[in-house]
Amino acid sequence: MERDRTEEGKFDFRDFDRILLRARAEGFRVDLLWFGTWKNGAMDWAPNWVKTDTARFPRVLDSGGKPIRVLSPHSGPRSTPTSGPTWP
C-alpha cells in the first residue's frame, strides 16, 4: 500500500484502522504480516521514495554486475559521522 507511506517519516494507517475496526465489529481477530521490502524477493512493496533513491537504497547486483529489482540488505555509501565510531 503506497498510500500509507508516501513521504519518508510520515505514515497513514487509516486503511489499516478501517480493516481492524471492521474485523472487531464482526468478531474476528487479525494478525498482520509485515513483508516490508522482501515480499517475494522483489521490492514491489517498498514506497516510491525508497525505489527512486538508489544511493541510499542500493539494489542487489546480478552475476554480471547489473542491478536487479531487489533491494540490497546492505546500506548505500557511508558518510563520515560527525561523532561516535568511525567507519573503515
Image: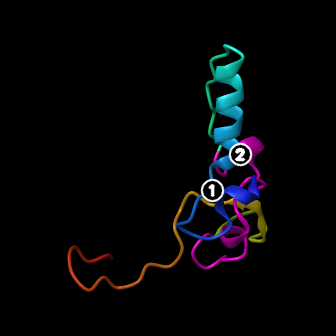
**Residue at the extreme top:** 27
* Alpha carbon separation for disc pair 2 and 1: 8 Å
Residue 51 at x, y percent in the picture: 72, 69
Q: Nearer the viewer, residue 53 or 20?
A: 20
Quarter placement of the C terminus: bottom left
Question: As drawn, is 86 to the left or to the right of 66?
Answer: left
Find numbered disc 1 in the image and state the secondary structure of the residue it sits on.
loop
Residue, x 22% and y 73% (percent of image)?
85
**Where does the magenta region start and end?**
36-57
Q: Return the mark for residue 31.
A: none
The three-letter code of the residue at mark 1 reads Asp
Callout 2: few (<14), some (14-19), or many (20+) C-alpha neighbours within 10 Å?
A: few
The residue indicated by pointer 2 is: 15
Residue 7 at x, y percent in the picture: 63, 70
The secondary structure making up most of the magenta span is: loop
The three-letter code of the residue at mark 2 reads Asp
Residue 35 at x, y percent in the picture: 65, 42
Q: Are the two marked residues, 2 and 1, in contact with CB atoms closer than 8 angstroms?
A: yes
The residue indicated by pointer 1 is: 12
Residue, x 70% and y 62% (percent of image)?
47
Q: Quadrant of residue 31?
A: top right
Find numbered disc 2 in the image and state the secondary structure of the residue it sits on.
helix
